[in-house]
């Protein structure tokens, strides 16, 4: 009996610890980017979306941006289209773009919206081409100097935050897929990290959170115990130079720094495989991921 009471008391203590954060963040926007294998696990995805439902219930204004790379790869395979990457970015020709749109909107986005609605949240899909305006991604091979072509892959050059703000004003949670519209009027695939950071730079929320399948920023990628709990933006270039920030984490951290420079107050890197990691990161003193702060 006493053990049961102690557990109830611990839960009450957790709520009391969260109280000042709930008061502080009431009415504040937070952009949450969902990606990685978290999107593939029904259990992990539901846990994170329950965190977002909690945020909305206590008065925060969450905005969700999601990826869906693995689902897209499956869709392309089913259509008999080869998946090819150049410098970590999916090459997207016209046929591939048709599949990307279908999967990201009708499968991934629809699933996220359905889970949030089941949790009592008025979630609404917002297709990215209504807010992201892009230019065609371009670049050259650093070794040969040869021009690279990713096809219908876009880099955001402008973001219309009006539809997002209208939805938040109406009490709904926007669920945004990373598709943009080019000057030619056609849809373009956008890297979801880049889409979330671009939105945050224009929206200037209180927080930007990247939820993926890594614990945060590690000093040693092979050692989960080497988590960097707080990173000052001024210290990030040194970590990049030393190779501590590298690979797929490099563009993510650069996106974080860009967002901070544009007015976002704090960026969080959170492991979506940990149950309710988003709530633990934002509503407790210790946190469980990496927070990046502007200096």
Image (cartoon, rainbow, N blue to C red):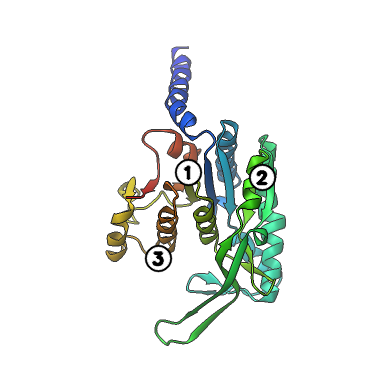
The mark that comes first in sequence, 1 or 3, is 1
239 w.r.t. 62: above or below: below
Locate residue 77: give its quadrant: bottom right
User: Which residue is painted at 63% across and 75% down in the image?
Assistant: 82
Q: Are marks 1 and 2 in contact (CB under 8 Å)?
A: no
Q: Nearer the viewer, mark 2 or mark 3?
A: 2
237 w.r.t. 84: above or below: above
* Residue assigned mark 3: 247
* Residue 228 visible in rendering: no
Front one among 169 and 51: 169
Badge 3 crowding class, 10 Å Cα cut-off, few under 14, some 14 to 19, many 20 or more, is few
Badge 2 crowding class, 10 Å Cα cut-off, few under 14, some 14 to 19, many 20 or more, is some
47 w.r.t. 134: above or below: above
Task: Judge left or right: residue 44 versus residue 16.
Answer: right
* Residue assigned mark 1: 206
Q: State the image coordinates of residue 185 (x, y, percent, origin top left).
A: 70, 71
The secondary element bearing badge 1 is classed as loop
Mark 1–mark 2 Cα distance, whole angstroms, equals 17 Å
Q: State the image coordinates of residue 199 (x, y, percent, origin top left).
A: 54, 55
């Amino acid at each position: 009996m006493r053990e049961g009471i102690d557990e109830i008391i611990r839960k009450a203590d957790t709520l009391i610890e969260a109280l000042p954060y709930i008061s502080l963040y009431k009415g504040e926007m937070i952009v949450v980017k969902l990606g990685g294998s978290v999107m593939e696990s029904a259990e992990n995805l539901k846990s994170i979306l329950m965190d977002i439902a909690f945020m909305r219930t206590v008065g925060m204004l969450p905005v969700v941006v999601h990826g869906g790379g693995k689902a897209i790869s499956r869709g392309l395979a089913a259509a008999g289209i080869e998946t090819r990457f150049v410098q970590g970015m999916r090459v997207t020709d016209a046929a591939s773009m048709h599949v990307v749109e279908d999967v990201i909107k009708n499968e991934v986005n629809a699933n996220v919206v359905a889970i949030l609605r089941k949790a009592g949240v008025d979630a609404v899909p917002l297709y990215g081409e209504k807010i992201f305006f892009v230019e065609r991604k371009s670049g050259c091979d650093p070794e040969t100097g040869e021009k690279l072509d990713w096809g219908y892959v876009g880099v955001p050059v402008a973001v219309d935050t009006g539809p997002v703000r209208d939805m938040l004003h109406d009490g709904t949670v926007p669920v945004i897929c990373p598709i943009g519209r080019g000057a030619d009027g056609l849809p373009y695939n956008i890297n979801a990290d880049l889409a979330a950071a671009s939105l945050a730079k224009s929206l200037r929320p209180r927080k930007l959170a990247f939820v993926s399948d890594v614990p945060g920023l590690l000093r040693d990628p092979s050692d989960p115990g080497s988590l960097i709990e707080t990173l000052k933006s001024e210290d990030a270039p040194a970590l990049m130079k030393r190779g501590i920030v590298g690979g797929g984490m490099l563009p993510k951290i650069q996106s974080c720094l860009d967002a901070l420079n544009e007015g976002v107050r704090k960026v969080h890197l959170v492991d979506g495989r940990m149950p309710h990691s988003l709530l633990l990161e934002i509503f407790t003193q210790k946190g469980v991921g990496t927070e990046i702060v502007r200096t």
